[in-house]
Image (cartoon, coloured by chain):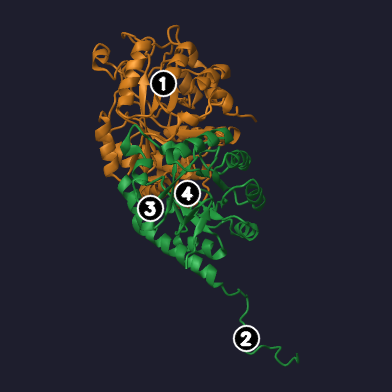
Amino acid sequence: MQTISTADFSTDDVAHAIHREQPGARDLAAMLSPAADTMLENMAQRARTLTRRHFGNTIALYTPLYLSDYCSGGCRYCGFAADRQRPRRFLNREERKAEMAAIAAMGIQEILLLTGERSEKVGIDYVEHAVREAAERFHAVTVEVFPMTSSEYARLVNAGCTGLTLYQETYDEKVYADMHRWGPKRDYHARLTAPDNALRAGMRNVGLGVLLGLAPATAEIMALAAHLQRLRRRWWRAGFSISFPRIRPEAGGFQPPNPVDDRMLVQIVLALRIYFPDVPLVMSTREAPSIRDNLAGLGITRMSVASRTTVGGYRPQLSADNATGQFQVNDDRDIETFTGAIRARGFWPVLKNSDAVYRDTGAGCPAQQR
Amino acid sequence: MSDLLILGEHSFASRLLLGTGKFSDVATMVDAVQRSGSGLVTASIRRFNRENRDDDLFGPLSRLPDLFLLPNTSGAMNAREAVLAARIGRELTGHGLVKLEIHPNPHHLMPDPIETFTAARELAADGFSVLPYMPADPVLAKRLEEIGCAAVMPLGSAIGSGQGLATAHLLRLIIENSNIPVIVDAGLRAPSEAAAAMEMGCDAVLVNSAVAAAANPGAMAEAFAQAVRAGRRAFQAGLMGRSDTAQATSPLTAFLAR
């Protein structure tokens, strides 16, 4: 990808970028540059119009289920990293069933299943079982697990998996090598190409993301945008979404080298919305209620709700002895409170936007060819 | 004098169809539907939520009097999914009128002509009155007519784009050649565009985003209703011809003996 220095942009460049019919990479860079700082309101106006046009007054909701905190990875920034001294657990079949029931009881129809990096206890067989169980209960089942081969992803698709979330964490190879100290996750390229494996296997949706705070944010977002562009030209049937989690305080006490403040986070959301008018932008409960509520419909169209980031967190008796999550949840509102806040802002919190009843799984969804 | 829109075995007084996605809440949606005067409102089967009434489109719409609920297959990726969705829609509503929508790309939402044709053929053979959402392709329109569709629904421009009648010249060809109703679906932003479509000879228009994403959806629904009526009336009245030059009252060739 060509390198664009963001220092060279003027407010005129930003103004031009905001209102172009099809903004290019240079326009995205302008909107992420320091020159855009004084133009945030203009960007917000445009972003709101585009969001409304493509997504209407709706916010799609999902809830994560942490299946396991076993991990073979050595990510410096993660509370689940293999060298952290902590009790580990994974949910057995009965526990998964109970957790899923607790989530379904909230009215949630889309679930995100999470694990750590591939480990002896939690591998493809385990994830496949969990997906199959979830697919009996939820209309959409996405996974945020370890990178897999195409044939492994095909097993998940056949089991009813509708989407993959896989963050590159950082697109900066040097920073990546420094942050991921050992284990399979050290392989930058294996992670980068895993979405292609999933899409080749017929996965319908792929969520990309960067972990904001690791490398300088502008270059990260530019690289993420280029990655998404490449994927969507190749896998034209797939849906894509983008997340940009900020590093939160967690068990290891990691201090991010390139922290992103609220203002920059908002600038990123607005710039991405203007650049990708029709791509869902996702925000989890890592962020505080004030940020989440204000960015709903201003760019963000998909949100997690009532999340527990501990294994077994949806039933108090299980979470009590395992109180440290992967990261600290900053928005701990229950579903009624959160959907009430979203409604008060004029948005329909959509719990069901797909239907498993008439969905082809695996073999029926044409494997995407090029 | 009655001027009804006939779709299969059903007839409707209003020529405005309303989509129901993208509204902020049930009350706003219901208000817009009522003020639109539309008798035919479409909802996606994927937004049927029997487990959570607050999130269900079908419940509140089916309780409105004099409203015909048209299920659509939006979200279906291919013909097989769409056919199954249509059958579920028939079970839910008790009638066989279905809006067939197949868009394999969830971002631009352009209809897949091949899968749409395949599904339409199967559904028509199964007794459905099929209303296929389609690209503004005059040949595809005739092919869909041949296999027994009750109407065709070519797009004015991309869903939610607000680009209006970007396909106007193709729509004219479709209208000129069609023996079944032509309903312009998608892309309209302003009531004037709905009026223009009706003046052109479209039989009806369907709007969703233009109403749902308006600052005042109920008022915008009323405005579209008026525009559709005006456009229809103008079409029936017969628009005068268009000319690039003024038409002299005293013709320049009057001296020629006849």
Toward the viewer: B194 or A268?
Answer: B194
Mark pair 1, 4: CA separation: 33 Å
Sequence-first disc among 2 and 3: 3
Q: Name above or below for residue A26 compared with residue B6.
A: above
The circle drawn on residue B160 is 4
Residue B248 in which image quadrant: bottom right
Asked if the residues shown at circle 3 and circle 1 are in contact, with their CB atoms under 8 angstroms apart, the answer is: no
Marks 1/4 same chain:
no
Look at mark 1 in the image and give the residue it sits on.
A134
- Could you say whether the residue bearing mark 2 is in a helix, strand or loop? loop
Q: Observer-nearest residue: A228 or A358?
A: A358
Q: Are marks 2 and 1 on the same chain?
A: no
Which residue lies under the disc numbered 3?
Answer: B66
- In the image, residue A84 lies at what x, y percent? 34, 11
Front: mark 2 or 3? 3
Q: Of callouts 4 and 3, which one flags the residue occurring earlier in the amino acid sequence?
A: 3
Label 2 and label 3 in one chain: yes
With A103 as the anchor, is B190 left or right in this view? right
- Foreground residue, B151 or B128? B128
Vertical placement of residue A115 versus A22, above or below: above
